[in-house]
Amino acid sequence: MEKENWVLACAVYIDEHLKEELSVERISAWAGYSPWYFSRRFKAQMGVSPMEYVKQRRLFAAAGEIRRGKRIIDVALDYGWETHSGFTKAFCGRFGYAPVLLRAIYICDASMEGEREHKELYLKTMETYKKTEELWEILCQTLRENKTEHDQENLIRIYELASSCHKGQKRYSGEDYINHSLNVALILADMGADEETVCAGLMHDAESGIWEEELKGEVTGERILNVLLAYREFEGRYESHDERGALIALADRLHNMRTIEFVDPSTWKWRAEDTMKIFSPIAAKYGDIRLRSELDELSMKFL
């Protein structure tokens, strides 16, 4: 096992054995390291202890089965909880609501509209080839739904500026490049980011010279520029004096992983490894379990 990849391999191993008895001793023995060394290296790379990671992954896997209609007690037993109450307590601690609510939503949706995923478990996903105008409307709607304080005229100004910066540019998927910027901004809005961060998300891939030329000299523009500079700082060394720069990088990586099938397949593995080694732990650091879980699940498909 390659030294730089063994922690990621352990994460994959955990995901493949979630319904079995897992311990630090078992996982470290599989990896070929002492429990102490394994635990230290795993936490340093993944941002949480091995058993906390196991618990998180079990809860998300359990949530997936519940939202597909499986009985709560059966799911709890499958994933290692001995009682309904113990599982409910852990579930509430992670998601902020009881599993019975997720089960009730499944029953209601299945009877009225057909099965669908419970939207609160993951960040909003916009299918590829969604029209630019639709993405813009969804972004505005998300800001309204989250009651995010913002100046609509300023948001329109930044959106139009971003659109002009990317005019004629295409993604590998064939989409207009501005759709990527809108998706990044939408992820940030769904995470509850403030107006400056959402606007910076719209502008994050524009040339930095344009940032300064168009945003310097007025209060709101300066605030957005500061977030963009924090993002550029994070890109250089995976650290930033302003956490909002890291949030933009995380949103950018999430959308890139959602659309990874459009890039060269020979790059899929290293992109997934990079996501697991760098971006997932950062998502854990900022406490966004939805973002962390989706990054992990997307990455594991290619490891």
Image (cartoon, helix red, strand yellow):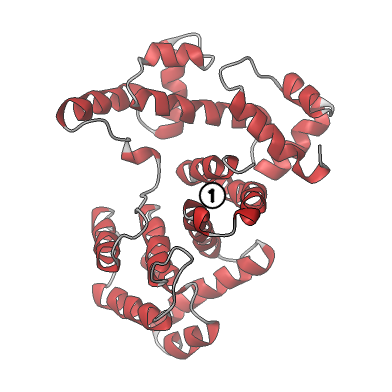
Percent coordinates x, y for residue 25 in the rendering: 76, 20
Percent coordinates x, y for residue 120 in the rendering: 34, 40
Percent coordinates x, y for residue 223 in the rendering: 44, 76
Tell whether 2 sits left or right of 118. right
Tell whether 294 sits left or right of 47. left
Tell whether 133 sits left or right of 27. left
Quadrant position of the C terminus in the picture = top right
Question: What residue lies at 28% left-to-right and 34% top-to-bottom?
Answer: 116
Q: Quick check: can you spot residue 49?
A: no
**Residue ID for mark 1:** 286
Name the amino acid, label 1.
Tyr
Question: What residue lies at 45% left-to-right and 18% top-to-bottom?
Answer: 87
Query: SS class of the residue under badge 1?
Result: loop
Crowd around label 1: few <14 · some 14–19 · many ≥20 (10 Å): few
Position above or below: 16 against 138:
above
Position above or below: 23 against 164:
above
The total of numbered circles placed on residues is 1
Quadrant position of the N terminus in the picture = top right
